[in-house]
Image (tube, helix red, strand yellow):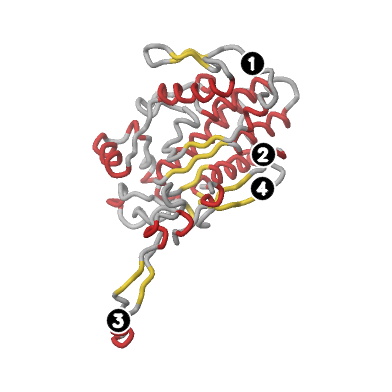
Amino acid sequence: MALLCDHSSGRNIIWATDDYAANGEGFYFHQPIEYPFITGDYEGIIKPRSVKAKEIQEARSKDKGEVFTPSWVCNAQNNLIDEQWFGRKDVFNHENDDHTWTTNPDKIVFPDTPGKTWRDYVKEIRMEITCGEAPYITSRYDTVTGKFIEPLDRIGILDRKFRVVLENYGEGTEYKKWFKWMRIALESTYGYEFQGDNLLLARENVLSSYIRFYMLRFGKEEFPNLKMLREAVDIITWNFWQMDGLKGVIPGTCKETELPTMADMFSGEKPSASLPCPGCASGDMSKHNGIKCKVKDWDLANDGKKKEVKYFHELIK
């Protein structure tokens, strides 16, 4: 399953939680999530937070600070971002007093100022940190109730970009231009997450939104071809990656360095002394000795013609 790929380690993303350890070998914190462990007898083992047992929700909130934000809150905050960008309120929807929203049915109008075209909006780089199931990116469903949300009523950052592309290349024979700008929308949207199950759900949600908007553009019976899906999955697995956000490395990969003493050398026993990871000891993200996380720079200024892989801790300097 391509959505399990981790480009930083060269293997699959890891569980990074012991919530599944009771299932035995293959389900421990440091082990990669393999396809057989989420299908067959284990189909449905990874669930959205809205359908997880309450005690598991509470435990993860306590241990990992995992708190999933209701869609109406995500909408309100994303609306504030767009209000600053557009210079006006209620661009994509109007917030109602009962924590719902009313979608603006009209084509989005962009400011008549340089750097504020619909293309600039789609290219705008946005990232959701510790993204969980990525509710700020795409609101495929409400993370609290689990209720499905129709594509044009979604309020995520990427949903809004997809809508803008659909409105500007929604008819006629502009297939290649539509496809290009859907790709750019994906390339300009990022997120990282600690726990592997959440990350897989986030990636699935992003891919599902991409497919849904394709079906809106070309018909409900249409489906992206294999080439399109492979390109979308490649971008998604680069742009939504697994990382300990405080360290810039894959969770749990920092290690101590063993220091054999004179007694150890003479006895032939395992070293009894060790040095902690330099980054863990100093708090300097660049000094962690775990597996550093790679991110792809898609060079959006040139429509993604040049792609460069960089380390996350280098990008944020």
Pick whichever, 87 or 26, lies toward us: 87
Instruction: Mark 1 or mark 4: name the one nearer the start of the chain.
Output: 1
Label 4 belongs to which residue? 307
Compared with 295, 221 (above or below) is above
Q: How far apart are labels 3 and 1 at the CA level?
A: 72 Å
Farthest residue in the left direction? 55
Pick whichever, 269 or 310, lies toward us: 310
Which element type, helix, strand or loop, lies under badge 2?
Answer: helix
User: Where residue 300 is drawn, which disc sits there?
Assistant: 2
Residue lying at 63% horizontally and 42% vertically, measured from the top left: 231
Label 1 belongs to which residue? 109
Pick whichever, 278 or 151, lies toward us: 278
Amino acid at circle 3? Glu
Residue lying at 32% horizontally and 48% vertically, measured from the top left: 20
- Residues under numbered marks 1 and 4 in contact, where contact means CB atoms less than 8 Å apart: no
Q: How far apart are labels 4 and 2 at the CA level?
A: 9 Å
Amino acid at circle 1? Val
Residue 295 image point, x, y percent: 56, 48
Amino acid at circle 2? Leu
Instruction: Mark 3 or mark 1: name the one nearer the start of the chain.
Output: 1
Label 3 belongs to which residue? 269
Neighbour tally class for label 1: few under 14, some 14-19, many 20 plus, Cα within 10 Å:
few
60 displayed left or right of 86: left
Which element type, helix, strand or loop, lies under badge 3?
Answer: loop
